Amino acid sequence: MVNLFCNFTKSEKIIMNKINRRNFILTSVTGAAGIFFYNPARANPVRETGENLLTRVALTAGDNRADMTFRALKPFAKQIKQAIGNRRVVLKPNNVSTSIQLSATHADTLEGILEFLKSIGKLNNVVIAESAADGPAMDGFSNFNYLRLANKYPVKFIDLDTAGFETLYVFDERDFKPHPVRISKVLLDPGSYIVSVARMKTHDRVVVTLSLKNIVVGAPVKDPGFTFGKNRKEGTRSDKSIVHGGGYRGIHYNLYDLASRLHPHLAVIDGYEGMEGNGPTGGTPVDHRVCVVSTDWLAADRVAVELMGVDFNNVAYLNYCAQAGLGVADLGKIEIIGESISNHIKTYKLHSNIEKQLSWMKPAG
């Protein structure tokens, strides 16, 4: 892991050590000028490469989702098999909607992963787990045809809303206070090997949603019976909105803050058909036909941002994670396996509210 703190002089380090948590939060939400430092107590290494070695990201292209996914995973076969060990493999799809397929992980992507796990002998303890944003996870599993996978693979399905939780605390920019949020025990469990099965999409609050956000915002649970609209059970609530932090600054900070505990161990980003415009649910399709895989989730997200033609500097939470040493975001330190990035860049149209989203760059007033 690169220690960014070592780049400072001795006197600068003394000053940094005097910064208390409140001052850290205050500086973090003032925008691009916010300062972040590597903290070995918070950072959780996600790669085993040395300081001078390149982090690998696989990029495949093709006309078959499952095949593209399988091929992107193969270069990491030995590393993934060793990392899984005796742990349960948790495939976490992105079902922000249980009914809009374009916004959700495709069953074929999951099948490509299951076929890969079969090829490395790690198919005996695999679950597909989700806490969908708008209703019961099983509705999405059924609507998106995930259940057919159980006919071919010994995979089980878990609704994270019913599988227990731990209470963590997140920041709200409106009052600068910590707020409790119920977080899935399955995704926090050290015995879980977390695979983020994401989709390339634009977003209405953080510019893009990729592998990290799929885990962090999918982890807060909701009460059974909670749905949006008239079918909502009285008295039920969802904790997902709490993580949004009360605004554009708060959500970026919380994504960064929770990343040390809620990052994926393996990032699989399906760009076969992306979403542009008013994502994460109201956008339009992009015929992209790529797949990105890495055991360094930040490197995978960084490559996906580049493939989407998005300015990485506009995505605050990923920049914060990079500055804190939670992964690699420097393209010069990333080895691309397979296709060339430059041959597959498609500029995604951003959300119509993008100017408001970028308000995080300005000092809080």
Image: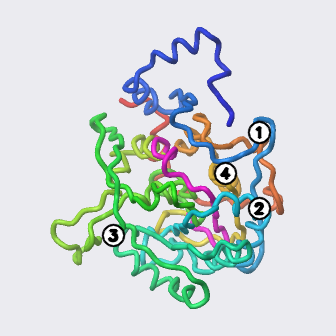
Q: Inspect the image, locate mark 4, and give the three-letter code of the amino acid beneath it.
A: Asp
**If the image is split into quadrants, where does the N terminus sit?**
top right
In this picture the colour scheme is rainbow
Query: Label 1 amino acid?
Result: Gly
Which is more N-terminal, label 3 or label 1?
Answer: 1
Q: Secondary structure at mark 3?
A: helix
CA–CA distance between discs 4 and 1?
Answer: 13 Å
Q: Which mark is residue 50?
A: 1
Image quarter in which the C terminus is found: top left
The residue beneath circle 3 is 162
On the picture, is 200 further left or further right than 74? left
**Magenta-colored span:** 256-276
Is 272 rendered above or below residue 76? below
Q: Observer-nearest residue: 292 or 112?
A: 112
Q: Nearer the viewer, mark 2 or mark 3?
A: 2
Crowding near the residue tagged with mark 1, few <14, some 14–19, many ≥20 C-alpha atoms within 10 Å = few
Residue 78: which disc? 2
Q: Which residue is mark 4?
A: 296
Amino acid type of the residue tagged 2 in the rendering: Lys
Residue located at (48% from left, 33% from top):
31
Report if residue 265 lies within the magenta region: yes
Quadrant in which residue 140 is drawn = bottom left
Neighbours of disc 3 within 10 Å: few (<14), some (14-19), many (20+): some
